[in-house]
């Protein structure tokens, strides 16, 4: 035994006083104010009307013309199927060719700009792929969204002369 006794921590638990929660407070408010009963009836009516309208919305009356509008429009883009010996860059080149042939009003791209677009599309598909590392097998479908191709074409048209020179070195 040691000459000094070890100090003991005294833990006092808090005392909880039961109080009504927000439901009890709301009930007490209604009890103390009799004129609030009209508010209570009004709230119940609003809830009932909302409930009935939600139920009726799901069922159509025979003879009614119901026109369904799609929530999401069909995606616009190009799906390219990989063949044996083709890589992602080849598929991006095919998608770019399809895009340019369908949009003749697009400013023609120089070869270095096309290479930039193909590289951008390839990197985009790899970055959004859930499969890492990205693998491409014959028969696989790769979807190139038109919006992404448009953005890459716009970026290619905005290349500076120095950037175009750097991309043209890749073509040699």
Image (cartoon, rainbow, N blue to C red):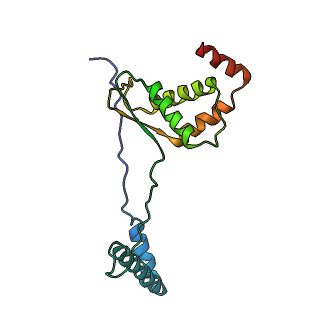
Q: Nearer the viewer, residue 158 or 127?
A: 158
Q: Is residue 166 left or right of residue 142?
A: right
Q: Is residue 166 above or below residue 91?
A: above
Q: Is residue 55 above or below residue 113?
A: below
Extreme-left residue of the structure: 1
- Residue 94 percent coordinates (x, y): 48, 32
Q: Nearer the viewer, residue 13 or 164?
A: 164
Extreme-right residue of the structure: 161
Q: Is residue 67 left or right of residue 109?
A: left
At x 66%, y 17%, the residue is: 166
- Residue 168 percent coordinates (x, y): 64, 18
Q: Is residue 38 above or below residue 149?
A: below
- Residue 69 percent coordinates (x, y): 44, 64
Q: Toward which corner of the image does residue 91 lie, by quadrant?
A: top left
At x 41%, y 82%, the residue is: 45
Q: Is residue 104 above or below residue 49?
A: above
At x 61%, y 35%, the residue is: 153
At x 64%, y 33%, the residue is: 155
Q: Nearer the viewer, residue 17 or 156?
A: 156
Q: Toward which corner of the image does residue 49 lie, by quadrant?
A: bottom left
Q: Toward which corner of the image does residue 87 lie, by quadrant?
A: top left
- Residue 126 percent coordinates (x, y): 45, 28
Q: Quadrant of the N terminus?
A: top left
């Amino acid at each position: 035994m040691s000459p000094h006794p070890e100090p003991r921590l005294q833990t006092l638990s808090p005392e909880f006083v039961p109080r009504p929660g927000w439901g009890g407070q709301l009930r007490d408010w209604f009890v103390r104010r009799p004129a609030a009963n009209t508010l209570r009836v009004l709230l119940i009516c609003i809830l009932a009307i909302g409930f009935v309208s939600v139920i009726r919305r799901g069922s159509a009356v025979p003879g009614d013309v119901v026109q369904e509008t799609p929530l999401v429009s069909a995606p616009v883009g190009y799906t390219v199927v990989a063949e044996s010996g083709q890589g992602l860059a080849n598929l991006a080149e095919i998608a770019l060719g399809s895009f340019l042939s369908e949009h003749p009003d697009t400013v023609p791209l120089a070869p270095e700009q096309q290479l930039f677009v193909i590289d951008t599309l390839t990197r985009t598909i790899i970055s959004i792929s859930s499969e890492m590392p990205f693998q491409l097998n014959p028969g696989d479908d790769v979807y190139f969204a038109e919006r992404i191709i448009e953005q890459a074409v716009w970026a290619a048209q905005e290349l500076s002369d120095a950037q175009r020179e750097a991309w043209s070195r890749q073509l040699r």
